[in-house]
Amino acid sequence: MHSAKGTPVPFILASPATGGGVNKAQSNSIFECSHFTIMFDDSKTGINHSPVWAKLHQHQRATRFMQMRELFLADAQRFQRFSLRLDGLLLDYSKNRITERTLELLIDLAHEAELPDWMQRMRCGERINVSERRAVLHTALRLPQSASLVVDGQDVVPEVHAVLQRMRVFSDKVRSGQWLGYTGQPIRDVVNLGIGGSDLGPLVVKEALAAYAHPGLKVHFVSNVDGQHIARTLEQLDPATTLFVVASKSFTTPETLLNAEAAKAWFLQAASQGDIARHFVAVSTNAPAVQAFGIDTEHMFGFWDWVGGRYSVWSAIGLPVMLAVGYDCFRQFLDGAHAMDEHFFHAPLAQNMPVLLALIGIWYNTFYQAHTHAIMPYDHGLRRLPAHIQQLDMESNGKRVGRFGAPLDFDTGPVIWGEEGANSQHAFFQLLHQGTRLVPCDFIVPMNSHYGLEQQHRVLVANCLAQSEALMRGKSEAEVMAELPDMPGEELDMLLPQKLFPGNQPSNTIALDKVTPRTLGMLLALYEHKVFVQGVIWGINSFDQWGVEYGKQLARRILPELDAAAAAPAAHDSSTRGLIEYFRSVHG
Ligand code: F6P
């Protein structure tokens, strides 16, 4: 939709009758969803032309030689002033190259981007995913049953809870051994077949909550279309005691459908068609495709187009988690996320965890030109968290145009990467400590372990705290000299620079009392809102992913060309053609 320059026009009109409703969940979460209209307004210049953007650049130039080590020396209360607690979660953001003034300016930037309005738009079910004309309501998935949220004239909360109840009944039956397979034996293995958001979220949560899992039920995840993933999983399993959860929002994703077909073929070698009903269930928004695959919709758990794939673990996509840990734990996980939502929607921006994480990220990404952001969970159960946050962040904010298509002439989402600690210390921390790049880090660490071995847990925590301290303070020449034995001058000249640590490397530490369903829910929701805030500030639609489509389109074209008997490869560049021909020759 285009308008004459300078004439803003309403992009999407939600009529007041079909707009947001009133949430009557708890007294502290009562809110009125006033009616917003998203304006297609190309008269506005981008945020990078705003005065506050220029002020932030100026501030960065003025403070860029500031040393965090000195900031800590000058202010004994720095930790108290730059940390926040919420239930079982503590965010320490004091080890950043920031002052009160930095935060003031960053909060001005958030206001410039109309962040509070966008937060309300999301919360109330406005169609803020403008390119797909969809609301973005993963927060509705974690509302308590007593709440109500009217979207397009319909209260979505009863629907959400109806699906949760169906999941509860089903998972109770499977967990209690009441749900029997075709030979009359209970289910012992569950295999989730899904990819991207239909895999990573539930995988991370199930792994992180291993201490809460049913001892007699193993939950496996198969995502890759590489046949070895499903083949190696199935070789451990007995079809008579295996349940498959085919998880795909669209139910058109080739990787998932091929794995589901492979699973069905494997199952039918032992069982008959009529047994499928006891061994295959689906999670999807596409009932006709589920039926076409051969799964009765009675065994389908639905969700809605207003749940993005990478935000879907809270929906029926979380079924493998519920199967592993049970309804009560899953509810606590949702409640934790809801607690973070309430904090996000109510806390002032300056004391708002997701907002602060987002603004500090923007400070480095935009004003320091840091290209990456590392995430280090010091918890073995959270080892796949970096992959989940990577999808969440990079699929959401890896965009080069704004929400209405205008090119963005500044950097947006960073490259997210990371690995569990302490393993990562022995892999890439050398570069963090003495390399040439600025790499902001998040350390995530539980204060308590579920697994006893107290001394090992203390060593783990000590390592985590030591890394953020070392990155921040570095090691000065005097400190190195004090550690070195006497040596000839030339040797000292060679050794000293190599033993120096420049320090001043920023990090946040997110400490959890313990990894529980509740704190885990809070943690994942914290990152979801962080990504949303950054998208709003950069003017991005964080909820579509057109960039994933092109590769899929070309793969469809290349697939038949891999057949040696097919016509010669169509017009490709010489590299792609050469590789296709190489494949054909190997199979020829
Ligand atoms: O990778 C693109 C994507 O669309 C993700 O956003 C999504 O989570 C994933 O594919 C799987 O999609 P589906 O659940 O529809 O199979």
Image (cartoon, helix red, strand yellow):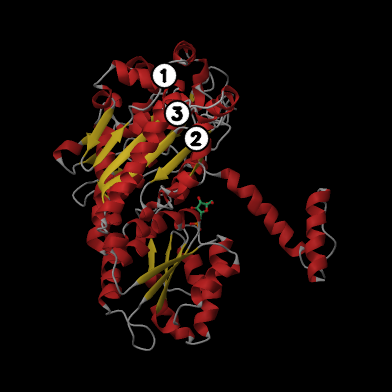
Question: Marks 2 and 3, how far apart in space?
Answer: 8 Å
Pick whichever of labels 1 and 3 is earlier in the sequence.
1
Residue 376 on image: x %, y % = 42, 43
| Identity, as a three-letter code, of the amino acid under mark 3 | Gln
Q: What residue is rendered at 70% in x and 53% in y?
A: 554
Helix, strand or loop for disc 2: helix
Q: What residue is rendered at 47% in x and 26% in y?
A: 364
Helix, strand or loop for disc 3: loop
Residue, disc 2: 432
The reply to whether discs 1 and 3 touch (Cβ–Cβ < 8 Å) is no
Give the quadrant of the N terminus: top right
Kindly indicate the quadrant of the structure image that contains residue 513: top left
Q: What residue is rendered at 40% in x and 55% in y?
A: 204
- On screen, residue 134 versus residue 583, left or right, reads left
Pick whichever of labels 1 and 2 is earlier in the sequence.
1
Residue 331 on image: x %, y % = 24, 56
Residue 210 visible in the displayed image:
yes
- On screen, residue 338 versus residue 138, left or right, reads left
Identify the disc placed on residue 217: none
Residue, disc 3: 505
Identify the disc placed on residue 67: 1
The reply to whether discs 2 and 3 touch (Cβ–Cβ < 8 Å) is yes
Residue 297 on image: x %, y % = 41, 70
